[in-house]
Image: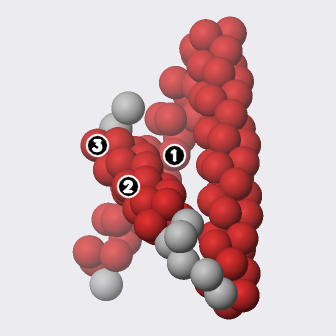
Amino acid sequence: MSRHRKTDAAGVDTLAKDARALLHATSDVAGEKVAEARERLSTALERGREIYDRARERAIESARTGDQFVRRNPYAVAGIALGIGAVIGILLCRRKGD
């Protein structure tokens, strides 16, 4: 896992822990507005976890698909990478000449 993903995952986990701690800390507080806020926060936490899990699964599936494509077509991938590198090199050389 990359450093950025670890940082993002840790940030999401910290946010979820803080939100759960807030829910726990306000459990004895009475009031309609507090109850509504607690319910909205609880719902948002559940939705956030579902979205995070779906995004994670899609990312894993995309990585697997990419890996399979590279393993099945190594020469094509090398050719594509060479072509993209050449185009970037040409664009950078043209920019320096301006």
Q: Secondary structure at mark 3?
A: helix
* 32 over 12 or under it: above or below: below
Q: Amino acid at mark 2?
A: Thr
Q: Residue 38 appears at what percent x and percent y?
A: 64, 73
Please indicate whether residue 80 sits to the left or right of residue 4 in the image.
Answer: right
Can residue 95 be seen at all in this image of the molecule? Answer: yes
Work out how far the residue at label 1 is from the one at label 2, CA to CA, in angstroms.
Answer: 40 Å
User: How far, Cα to Cα, is label 3 from label 2?
Assistant: 16 Å
Per the image, the residue denoted by label 2 is: 14
Along the polypeptide, which appears first: circle 1 or circle 2? 2
Dot 1 and dot 2 residues touching (CB under 8 Å): no
Seen in the picture, residue 4 relative to 45 is either above or below; the reply is above
Residue at screen point 35% across, 42% down: 6
Q: What's the residue at 66%, 41% (across, down)?
A: 53
Q: Is residue 8 visible?
A: no
Quarter-wise, where is residue 88 in the image? bottom left
Image quarter (top left, top right, bottom left or bottom right) of the N terminus: top left
Residue 37 figure quarter: bottom right
Residue position marked by numbered label 3 in the rendering: 3
In the rendered structure, which disc, 3 or 2, sits on the residue that comes first in sequence? 3
Tag 1 residue: 84
